[in-house]
Image (spheres, grey):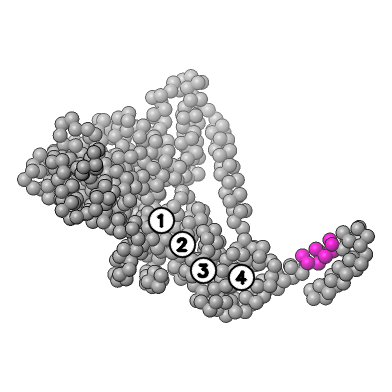
């Protein structure tokens, strides 16, 4: 693991995390904060410590070093995250890491196979057999430049074109089957292509690696119309958004993302100049996909098809977006056109105007309610109220909820107080849950100071360790395992670093340690030996007090039992303890 420590020492965790999370520096210190990429939150509880090179979320408990972050954010195994960071920062990898384990080897092979398939499909599209596909693309407004930028291609109509390409490279049958690019025949006699005569859309990870494909049927009557790669070791559909690898920086700059339904919608909107556009990859929107997008901006405009199926998909997706704390608008284009068709019919400038005028989600949903329920009847009003209220509860900003409460009361012809009462009930439940979570995570102030001191210097460890070893109070700390780990490491003569301590702790221990090291006041002012010694004195006094109380209790029990000799012995112990205190 020497190389891993060397790698971490040469990488700035703030820079790496800053590409996925909008970080803000806290004062002039080493701490940065931002919205956690791993759970839904409105107020930043995610911290990055530049000096100790770790991150910690006080909301969900996520934490670790730069390698752990890359593993979590991109769903990579350990050695692949190491390899990615090393290659990206120009740090040579030791030979042993090239085949660190079977999973890493296979993922590397699958990436390679997808790159080969990408080039094969691209050459087919722009070769002699691609005229019909190029014509379709042109009719949909796709230029050669757009096709090149998105890496579009064409799968041949032959049953085993891509299969033969991969077999010529001598890939193992198990790797071929795992790739998702080919399928095993029912009788087990060989493989054939998954994609046949389809316009091919490569799907990339956020890091820009090809991990799958979506294929649009070109032959009349060929079903399904869109066929997507199956789940593979490198492709998890529920965690990937199409075009996020290109769009993420623009999403950060614009402060919002545009979510559309299909590949061609993305390409049409992108070509119109809206570069912060993404789509799901043939699946219903998931919380994991929303978190991928929310890492870059907390606002989204949903622009699905305007038909009934599109409206239902908007409702479902909006629920997920709101539950993940995203501020939401909905763009419904006129004329029953999807985004790609609308841009071709009305031009990019008109689409941009429509995008700027996107409505708040509640107002779009209220229009949906009008079409569903008779608001002139009491029953209809109750139905509307029940239909709209859950969506309002999910809105992340209080000011938005209050504004919508006014609109809802006016819309239904009821008092605003009734709506606000419902809001207050929900808010009280949320506060109670948060308070319970905080109480569960409170540490003793002495515990925090002493842990900080032990991690800060060898001098502090040498001076504090003997006393801490004898104190019963340390064994009662929530972080007793952390104290024990630090003290043992110091006593062994090894260097006490954050990485070394973390490696010897379980998940809860790591979370406690990282939380302590990110205490704002201690980060600003540090912990002096005088403060640490004062902690020891307070703890010692507390232990003496507990000892005296315990002896008094035993003396009373002995006296009640008529054991006078035992009572006298205990009194002698108490007097000795009081003299020491």
Secondary element at tag 3: helix
Q: Is residue 16 left or right of residue 424?
A: left
Marks 1/4: CA–CA distance: 31 Å
Q: Residue under circle 2?
A: 64
- Residue 102 appears left or right of 440: left
The tag earlier along the polypeptide, 1 or 3, is 1
Residue 357 at what x, y percent from top left? 32, 40
The earlier-in-sequence mark between 3 and 4 is 4
Q: Which residue is mark 4?
A: 450
User: Label 2 to label 1, Cα distance in Å?
Assistant: 10 Å
Q: Between residues 85 and 375, which one lies in front from this camera angle?
A: 85
Q: CA distance from mark 1 to mark 3?
A: 21 Å
Quick check: 133 left or right of 461?
left
Please name which of the two marks, 3 or 4, marks the residue nearer to the observer. Answer: 3
The answer to whether residue 520 shows anywhere in this view is no
Q: Which residue is mark 1?
A: 72
Q: Are marks 2 and 1 in contact (CB under 8 Å)?
A: yes
Q: Residues within 10 Å of mark 4 (few under 14, many from 20)?
A: many
Q: Which residue corresponds to mark 3?
A: 501
Residue 404: give x, y in percent of width and height: 47, 37
Q: Residue at x 48, y 66 (%)?
A: 503
Sequence-first tag of 2 and 1? 2
Residue 373 seen anywhere in this rendered image of the structure: yes
- Between marks 1 and 4 in the image, the one whose residue lies nearer the viewer: 1
Q: Is residue 385 magenta?
A: no
Q: Earlier in the sequence, mark 3 or mark 2?
A: 2
Q: Nearer the viewer, mark 1 or mark 3?
A: 3
Distance of label 3 from label 2 (alpha carbons): 12 Å
- In the image, farthest residue toward the top: 377
What segment carries the magenta color?
545-554
């Amino acid at each position: 693991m020497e190389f891993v420590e060397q790698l971490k020492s040469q990488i700035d965790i703030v820079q790496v995390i800053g590409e996925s999370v909008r970080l803000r520096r806290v004062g002039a210190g080493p701490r940065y904060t931002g919205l956690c990429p791993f759970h839904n939150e409105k107020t930043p509880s995610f911290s990055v410590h530049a000096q100790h090179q770790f991150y910690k979320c006080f909301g969900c408990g996520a934490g670790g070093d730069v390698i752990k972050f890359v593993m979590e954010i991109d769903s990579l195994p350990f050695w692949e995250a190491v390899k990615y960071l090393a290659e990206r920062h120009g740090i040579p990898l030791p030979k042993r890491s090239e085949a660190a384990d079977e999973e890493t080897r296979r993922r590397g092979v699958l990436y390679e196979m997808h790159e080969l398939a990408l080039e094969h499909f691209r050459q087919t599209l722009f070769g002699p057999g691609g005229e019909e596909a190029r014509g379709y693309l042109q009719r949909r407004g796709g230029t050669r430049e757009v096709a090149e930028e998105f890496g579009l291609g064409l799968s041949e109509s032959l049953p085993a074109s891509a299969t033969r390409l991969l077999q010529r490279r001598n890939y193992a049958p198990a790797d071929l089957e795992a790739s998702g690019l080919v399928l095993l025949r029912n009788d087990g006699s060989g493989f054939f292509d998954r994609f046949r005569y389809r316009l091919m859309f490569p799907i990339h990870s956020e890091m820009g690696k090809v991990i799958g494909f979506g294929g649009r049927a070109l032959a009349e009557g060929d079903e399904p119309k869109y066929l997507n790669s199956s789940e593979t070791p490198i492709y998890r559909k529920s965690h990937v958004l199409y075009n996020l690898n290109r769009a993420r920086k623009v999403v950060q700059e614009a402060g919002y993302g545009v979510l559309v339904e299909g590949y061609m919608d993305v390409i049409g909107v992108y070509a119109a100049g809206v570069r912060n556009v993404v789509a799901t990859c043939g699946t219903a929107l998931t919380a994991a996909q929303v978190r991928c997008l929310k890492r870059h901006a907390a606002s989204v405009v949903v622009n699905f098809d305007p038909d009934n199926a599109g409206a239902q998909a908007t409702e479902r997706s909006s629920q997920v977006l709101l539950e993940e704390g995203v501020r939401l608008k909905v763009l419904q284009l006129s004329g029953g056109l999807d985004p790609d068709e609308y841009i071709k019919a009305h031009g990019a400038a008109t689409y941009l105007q429509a995008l700027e005028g996107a409505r708040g989600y509640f107002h779009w949903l209220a229009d949906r309610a009008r079409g569903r329920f008779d608001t002139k009847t009491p029953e209809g009003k109750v139905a509307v109220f029940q239909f709209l209220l859950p969506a309002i509860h999910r809105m992340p900003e209080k000011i938005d909820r209050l504004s919508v409460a006014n609109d809802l009361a006016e819309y239904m012809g009821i008092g605003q107080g009734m709506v606000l009462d419902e809001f207050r009930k929900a808010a009280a439940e949320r506060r109670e849950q948060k308070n319970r979570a905080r109480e569960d995570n409170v540490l003793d102030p002495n515990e925090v100071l002493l842990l900080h001191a032990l991690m800060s210097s060898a001098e502090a460890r040498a001076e504090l360790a003997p006393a801490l070893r004898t104190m019963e109070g340390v064994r009662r700390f929530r972080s007793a395992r952390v104290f024990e780990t630090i003290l043992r490491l110091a006593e062994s003569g090894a260097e006490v670093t954050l990485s070394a301590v973390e490696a010897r702790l379980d998940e809860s221990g790591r979370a406690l340690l990282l939380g302590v090291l990110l205490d704002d006041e201690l980060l600003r002012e540090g912990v002096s030996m005088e403060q640490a010694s004062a902690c020891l004195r307070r703890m010692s006094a507390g232990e003496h007090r507990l000892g005296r109380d315990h002896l008094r209790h035993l003396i009373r029990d002995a006296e009640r039992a008529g054991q006078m000799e035992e009572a006298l012995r205990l009194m002698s112990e108490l007097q000795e303890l009081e003299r020491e205190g």
